[in-house]
Image: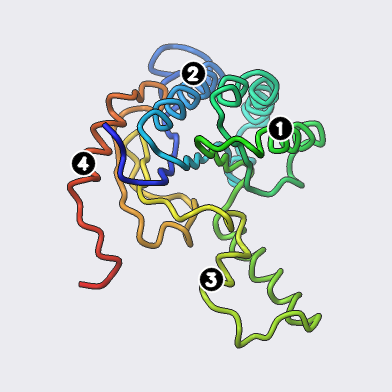
Amino acid sequence: MTAVLKHIAFIMDGNRRWAKKHGLPITAGHKKGAETLVEIAKAAKELGVKYITVYAFSTENWQREPSEVAGLMDLLRQYLTRGFKELQENNARIIFIGERDMLADDIVTKMAEIEEQTAANSDVTLCVALSYGGRQEITAAARNLAKKVQQGQLNPQDIDEKTFANALYTADIPDPDLLIRTSGEMRISNYLPWQLAYTELYFSPTLWPDFTKEELINIIENYQTRERRYGKS
């Protein structure tokens, strides 16, 4: 099948519950979830999806147990070094959105390297929301626009939805057509609140490490039966 949608956003929920279910340490759940991310990104590309955005680590996640955060950062280092290589070889552009000043310098440096190395890749764009919070993104955009007004670079009357959208991290990415959240939770958790205004939502009971290409196909088929009205009727 070929998808009729450009952009799918994912909230990859359930790694910790998967680990507990299997009697494994929490880091094992995150590792399996990272492997699932690579497989689902490849599957989405095969299905014709052009943009994939994933919620990898939120600003709120910094409040978790220090040992879990440290484990996640170590896993991130591994994937920045090796894990994304397969996607790079599959002509994927990889970009990161979020508050980079909260991350370690070596991680930020590697993120920038990957973005530069994959900038010309065109089959699919994987956007990784890392140290990301939706309200923080909107606040930062408002602050940047206010600074431009203060400096005389922008007239307040010229600020419209397009201007504001262009001040967000996702300025060059279309809004998601579909949001998939796994593990049965039914909320967006401060994820892309501006961008999800007219996005179709799908909540799967599957824990993220168990999510498969087959389920993705079923969800896309469900999406294709929906009529998107954008508030017109």
Q: Residues within 10 Å of mark 3 (few under 14, many from 20)?
A: few
Compared to residue 178, the image places residue 137 above or below, namely below
The mark lying in front, picked from 2 and 1, is 1
Figure quadrant of residue 65: top right
Q: Amino acid at mark 4?
A: Asn
Measuring 60% from the left and 60% from the top, which residue is drawn there?
Answer: 168
Figure quadrant of residue 71: top right
Q: Decide which of 142, 231 is in the foreground and name it.
A: 231
Q: Which residue is mark 4?
A: 222
The mark lying in front, picked from 3 and 1, is 1
Q: In this rendering, would 108 be left or right of 174?
A: right
The mark lying in front, picked from 2 and 3, is 3
Secondary structure state at the residue bearing disc 1: helix
Q: Residues within 10 Å of mark 4 (few under 14, many from 20)?
A: few
Q: Position of residue 204 (x, y in %)?
A: 29, 36
Q: Which residue is mark 1?
A: 117
Q: In this rendering, would 71 be left or right of 8?
A: right
- Disc number placed over residue 32 in the picture, else none: 2
Secondary structure state at the residue bearing disc 3: helix
Q: Residues within 10 Å of mark 2 (few under 14, many from 20)?
A: some
Q: Position of residue 86 (x, y in %)?
A: 57, 20
Q: Which residue is mark 3?
A: 162
